[in-house]
Each structure stands twice: as C-alpha cells, then as structure tokens.
Amino acid sequence: MQWPRHGWISGSRKLHKGEKEMNPRAEITIAQTLLVLCLCGLAAQAQSGTRSPAKTKNYRFDTVDYPGASSSYLSDINQRDKTAVGYFFAGPGPSPTAFTFKGTTYKVIQVPGATASALLGINSSDQMVGYYVDSGDLIHGFLDNGGKFTVLDYPGAEATEPFGINGSGAIVGSWYAESEPPQGFL
C-alpha cells in the first residue's frame, strides 16, 4: 500500500475550486525568508545581551501507583469528579489490568471475558473506554457505562482500541487488520 502524499508537495493533491497551485520556488523563498528573520532576531537578542525569560507555570504532580503493581499508567481524567483511568502491570508479564483512581481510592475494572484490559478514556458522565484481550488473544474495544459493558469491534478489524470519549458519547480510536496499516475511527 502506498502512503498518501500531503498537500505541501507540489502536484500531490487535488486543488479546490478557485485554489491555485503554489510555485515550488515560492515555497522555498518563503521558508528562506522566515529562517533569515528568525536568525536576525536571535542575533539582535544576543548582541543586546538581554533575553526574555521563558514563561513558566508551576504544576503540582502527584504519584499514582496501583498498590503492589510493578508499573502503573494513567491515560485520562474527567473534569467533573477528577476520576482518572488507566492500567497497571502486576509483574513482569505482558498483561495489563484496567483500573480507576479517585481521591485515594483505586478500583479494578473487571471486563467480562478478559485476560487483560486497559482503560484509556473517560468523560464527565463516567463513561469509560478501553480495550481487552480475550482467551483467544483477540483485542476488543469496550465501553463501560456504569458497569454495563458494550463490546466495540470495528467491522473487519482484528483489533479495536478506543482511546477517548467525549461528553456526547462520541468515541475515537484505532483499528488494525493484518494487511492494513492502523486506521482511525470515530
């Protein structure tokens, strides 16, 4: 399969009505002009001996490690009640376990039929999405809506991995098939 070429390469995409193709030499001229302007600005700053301090913001970091886990990963947090979702590994093996974290409370999410699972997204209604591995080593997506699980399998895919869910319940992720590169879905 050939990867698509993007619009910045001359002649690589269909032009929209009224749009004119840019002269490739003009693209180089614009890039060169921007580079010269940036270099001039840096040179002037160096000569004056003053530098603007970088604007920084202080963030507070909290460690969240599932008790007894060899490693823990958080992937999303909702804004309503600050519930975080993720997964942990109990040992050196390749099988993650989905969990939530709120305040000081950890909760394992038991996905029916799963030998491994991971939570990757949560919305303000506490709907959660992720993936699980079944006993046949197949990867399925799932939606957990208040403890009710819905399997999310993209048609014809060998694996489906939802990554996020918005407040309206729209889910985004990727699906995989052996003969295809990964594809996104909404």
Image (cartoon, helix red, strand yellow):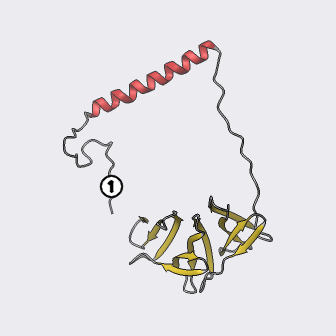
Is residue 14 rendered to the left or right of residue 136?
Answer: left
Is residue 29 rendered to the left or right of residue 60?
Answer: left
Is residue 31 rendered to the left or right of residue 132?
Answer: left
Q: Above or below — where is 87 with respect to 41?
A: below
For the residue marked with disc 1, what is the amino acid? Pro
Q: Which image quarter holds the N terminus?
A: bottom left
- Name the residue that disc number 1 marks: 4
Q: Which image quarter holds the C terminus?
A: bottom left
Find the residue positioned furthest to the left.
17
- Label 1: which secondary element: loop
Residue 125 seen anywhere in this rendered image of the structure: yes
Q: Residues within 10 Å of mark 1 (few under 14, many from 20)?
A: few
Task: List x then y, in percent, for residue 127.
Answer: 57, 71
Task: List x then y, in percent, for residue 75.
Answer: 62, 62
Residue shown at 42% from the left, 26% from the top: 34
Residue shown at 76% from the left, 57% from the top: 63
Residue 138 seen anywhere in this rendered image of the structure: no
Task: List x then y, in percent, for residue 49.
Answer: 65, 15
